[in-house]
Image (tube, helix red, strand yellow):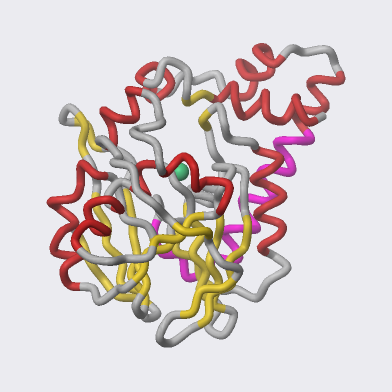
Amino acid sequence: MNVQTIEGVTIAHVIPESKGRKMTPVYLFAVDNMLVDTGPSNMYKTLRPFFDAQSYDFIALTHNHEDHSGNVAELANQRELPVYVHEIGLEECFLETPYPYYRQLAWGERKPFQPSKMPDQLTTSNATWDVIFTPGHAKDHISLLDEQTGRLFTGDLFVTPKPKVIMEAESIPETLRSLKKLLNYEFTSIFCCHSGYHKNGKDMINLKIEHLEALIAQVHELTDLGHSIDEIDKLLYPKTYPIETVSEGQWSSRHIVSSIVEEQ
Ligand SMILES: [Zn+2]
């Protein structure tokens, strides 16, 4: 685990391994008295020194995926700890591992927990955080912004400017709308749960917007020419990524194309 503090945010960075293979890096954050996301449960032991060193008294989840909510039950069991999740995601948190087996293998078992509805704003000891509803990657996804300093927690909304595979429940047009929504706010840096801190956060968000706009235009053009989703997928994403095989197609470039075609 690597821990560093940037712009008053303490960042924990871990690279989980599954069957000896390095997986997507995971970042979680502590700022003032707030913990933003908790990482996957199979990284609890590694992350424990970070949790122990922080003086948070509530947890905000950007969304309820198990690599963000994996340690909530463990942390909330240790003491009374309010946990906030967007209301759309509340019910899933009550359930025992409501996600496919390959994700249980990758991230471990996420124990159920009892969160409260995310308010419109969160107040920490030194800042006020606007809660911005930013679905697309997940239906309950939010971002947290301190407009005073321009710091923005983007959960899994950014991750990479040019996604090659997404999960079935994700939507590229919805992600694009959420990214554009962020441009209505004043922000500078972003804190991403899988790519970490970006000082030039606004540029990174703009880069992804540009890519997704061009991609959507291209998919629309190919659809108008009579190509099917599978044909467009093969044309735009000829390569098969290991995650597509491991997840038995639950992660796939095809979902990128189909989410665009379905909204056309
Ligand atoms: Zn996620």
Residue at the extreme right: 224
Q: Please tell me whether the stretch drawn in magenta is mainly helix, strand or loop.
A: helix
Which span of residues is magenta-colored?
Answer: 196-217
Q: Is residue 238 left or right of residue 37?
A: right
Q: In which quarter of the image is the N terminus?
A: bottom left
Choose top left, top right, bottom left or bottom right for residue 132.
bottom right
Q: Quadrant of ligand 1?
A: top left
Q: In which quarter of the image is the C terminus?
A: top right
Question: In the image, is residue 147 part of the stretch drawn in magenta?
Answer: no
Residue 200 x/y as whole percent: 53, 68
Q: Which of the pair 13/77 is nearer the observer?
A: 77
For residue 228, above or below residue 197? above
For residue 245, above or below residue 44? above
Residue 187 x/y as whole percent: 60, 73
Q: In this view, does 92 lie to the left or right of 264?
A: left
Q: Which residue is drawn at 82% across and 26% down?
A: 221
Q: Residue at x 65, y 76 (%)?
A: 186
For residue 89, above or below residue 10? above
Q: Which of the pair 65/95 is nearer the observer?
A: 95
Question: In the image, is residue 214 part of the stretch drawn in magenta?
Answer: yes
For residue 102, above or below residue 132? above
